Every structure is written in C-alpha cells, then in structure tokens.
Amino acid sequence: MKRYLILAISMVIGISSFTQEDVAIDADMLNGFREAFNDDPTTEAVQNAASSNDIQKLALNRDHLGQVDPYFSNRVESKGITDQKSTGRCWLFTGLNVLRARVIDEKQLAAFSFSQNFNFFYDQLEKSNLFLEGIIETADKPMDDKTVDWLFSNAIGDGGQWTGVVDIIQKYGVVPAEIFPESHNSENTRWMSRLLRRKLRADGIALREMYSNGVKKKELRNEKEEMLMQVYRILAISLGEPPTEFQWRYTDKDGNLTEMKTYTPKTFYEEFVGVDLSEYVMFMNDPSREFGKLYEIEFDRHMADGDNWKYVNLEADKLKEFAKNSILGNEAMYFSCDVGKQLDKDRGYLDVNNYNFDALFGVDFDMDKKDRIITHESGSTHGMALVAVDINDGKTTKWLLENSWGDSGFKGHLIMTDEWFDEYMFRLVIHKQYIDEETLGILDQKATLLPPWDPMFSPDE
C-alpha cells in the first residue's frame, strides 16, 4: 500500500523515480489475488449467481421487505400523476407540481396540470442566450481556459434546478397543459438537444473568431441575435410555438363550470398562482462545506439576466423541521437528491437498507456523505416534490415524494425513509414563512462564490 501512496505523490510533484516494473501488476501480485479469491469457500456459488444475474437483485435485502408501510400522518393535498418521459426535465415538473398543489387546493379543482412544454421552450431559448453571452464575455480568454472549456462542454441541456423555475416563470408566466400540450420532442429531447448543442458550439466558435478579428462586443451581440433567431426556429419546429394569449375555462371538483376568459401566460399565473417566488429559500445539505453559510455558484442559472443560484448550507435535522412545518401548512416543496442510491424502483422505496452489496461481494463499500461528495460518488441527480411526512409518537419515520416518472414506484410516488433523507438529500426549497429568523439571517451574508464546475452545480434530471 505504501508504494502506491508514494507513487501517487511522486506523480503529483513530477518525480519519476520508479520504473514500469515498480508500479506494474506483476505475476506474484496476481497469484496473491487468485489465492485470496479461491480460499473463500463461498466464492464459487456467489460467482455463479452474480455472473448470470442482475447484481442489484441479488443484493436485495429480503429481511427488510415489508418494513415500510405506505401510510402518512401528514400530507399535502395534491392530485394526478405526471411523466417527464425520456427527458431531464424533472426540475421543471417538480417546480410546477409544487405550484400545482397550491392551485388545486385554492381553486378546489378535481385535477390540474401546467404545460411543461411551454416553460421548457423558453428555458431552452434562455439557456442558449446565456451560453452565447458567456462566450462573448470570455472571448479574450484562450480555448483551454477552464471557464471557456466548461462553457463549451456544457453548452445546453434539458436538466436544471429551482433557479430556472423561478426565472422562467417570472418572465414568461405559465399556461394549462391542454393549452400547449407536449410534443414528441418535448418528451424525447435527445435529438433536439444534440442539434442545439452542435449549433451553439458552432456559433460560439464563430463569435470567438469574430472577436479575434477585431469585432467589438456590441457588434457580437448583434450577431448573437441572429443566432438566437435560428435557435427559436429549431425550438418552434420541435416543440411548437408557445401561445402569447389564450382562452380557458374549467370545472371545479363539484362539476361547476366557470365562464370562458382570455389570459396571457403572465395574467394566468397572477390569477391562479399569484405567489412571489422570490420568497422561497434554496437549502443544501453538503457536509463537505461549512454549515450556516450562504453560497453562490457562478453560471448556475438559466437566463443571462437571471440570478445565480444561492443556497444556504444547513444540517439535515434543521431542514427536516422546516420541511415538516411546510407540510403541516399544506405546501409542497422542491426536493432533489441522489435518487439512484438504494432505490427499489419496483416498490417505490428509498431506504439505506434496501440492498447489501457488501454481503454479496464480501467487500466494504462504505463511504460517508462528505466523502461521496468530494469524490463525485454522489450528487444531486433528480428533483421531486416533497408532499408528506409520517410522524409517530413524535418521531419522524419516513417521507413521501411526488415523482414525475408516470405511475411507476408507489402509485407515481417514492417513499423515503428518514435515514435515507440524511444520506442522499441535497436540495430543498422552502417558503420563508416556515423558516426561523436566525436561519433567514444567513441570507444577509455575502455569498461565497463557487465556480461553475463545482460538484453542487449538477443539474437535476
């Protein structure tokens, strides 16, 4: 073990004092591996099973099945199941589903859904503008500059987070799902995303070449407008052209039909939602950084004229208290996590005891949350709406997440144990009314600015 540590150090500081023979896997080492492997009497049976079957299924902890019941003591009123299909739009579904619960409750609707396609159209247009603006602002830097390289590597995608929900809705409004329904390409974004990335990267190179030939930034922005016109064309052909005005009426849960009214997307938002989205606070539970501090991630936004994502890093227990307050106040929350860890997708359970890979392989895979973050083993991958909590004898046992994977899992939801919340929750957005004054005071701090390649940037998908 020591020689590998010394080798790693020598590679970092540029010392090449070892030959290839010193660092290679040699015959003696391989023989040691074989002997250790074959000395275990259970090896053959495990090898036969694992080489012919799904590893996750073999690692299923059968003793734990049935340990989590599907009932919750406190739940936000919400109805309906949504499906993001083959896309990374979970962040948008989550944000709109949080607002949808409010609309259903206040307007006493039998069911209701927003058009994700409408907001997705403008998200992609705004992200294109953000990328091109980033290229213009860094045009004087070399291609191998880390920010320039990051921009071209992350030209555009369909993932995102709460900041995008806020900025896009505040600027463009919302519409009901039936007014601007899904298209094939909104539900299957792969080809549209590929073409947008290719177009933006080509335009980015063109802008840099113009700058190197003496074109001023003001003139580059004139060129950018022409480029965005082509992006708009790609989006309108792929997704449809979003409405600027529409007529709509609805029936409430008692079957009463309202009169037909004319709306713009912004007047519809004002009448049916009417929430000041700036009153919500983004939290993170990241033990690799100091708690009780405000952080900001550069370029972590969806619009050039929007705000970078700022978050308060806080202990999980405090976040749980605020989350319980919100649920008791009948308000769902934007929640994101590392959903693939210990997920029993068939049953819809997120539990740290679902699978025992250590027992299957006879190997210790254990890492704490901090180490998983700093080694890129874990990060936020998926957003859902947090809608329920189960409290028994004063103890919180589990939580309920409204998902956007259709009716999979537990009736379109995932049940999350309290321990899983600690280990794999990352982002949580809560209205200020459910947060104590001391915590709100953290928002007055000067935020620590983090680079766009920070592990916490990872978009929810």
Image (cartoon, helix red, strand yellow):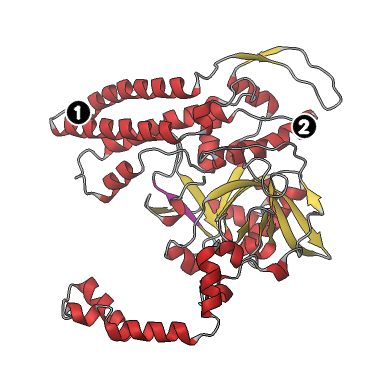
Residue 309 higher or lower than 122, as above or below: below
Q: Which residue corresponds to mark 1?
A: 216
Left or right: residue 159 compared with residue 207: right
Query: Which numbered mark, 2 or 1, is in the foreground of this view?
Result: 2
Q: Position of residue 74 (x, y in %)?
A: 80, 51
Q: Secondary structure at mark 1?
A: loop
Q: CA distance from mark 2 to mark 1?
A: 52 Å
| Residue range highlighted in magenta | 294-298
Residue under pointer 2: 106
Corner quadrant of residue 7 = bottom left
Q: Is residue 207 visible?
A: yes
Seen at 16% across and 80% down, the residue is: 17
Q: Amino acid at mark 1?
A: Lys
N-term-proximal mark, 2 vs 1: 2
Where residue 62 appears, as percent x and y from the top left, is: 70, 68
Quick one: quadrant of the N terminus? bottom left
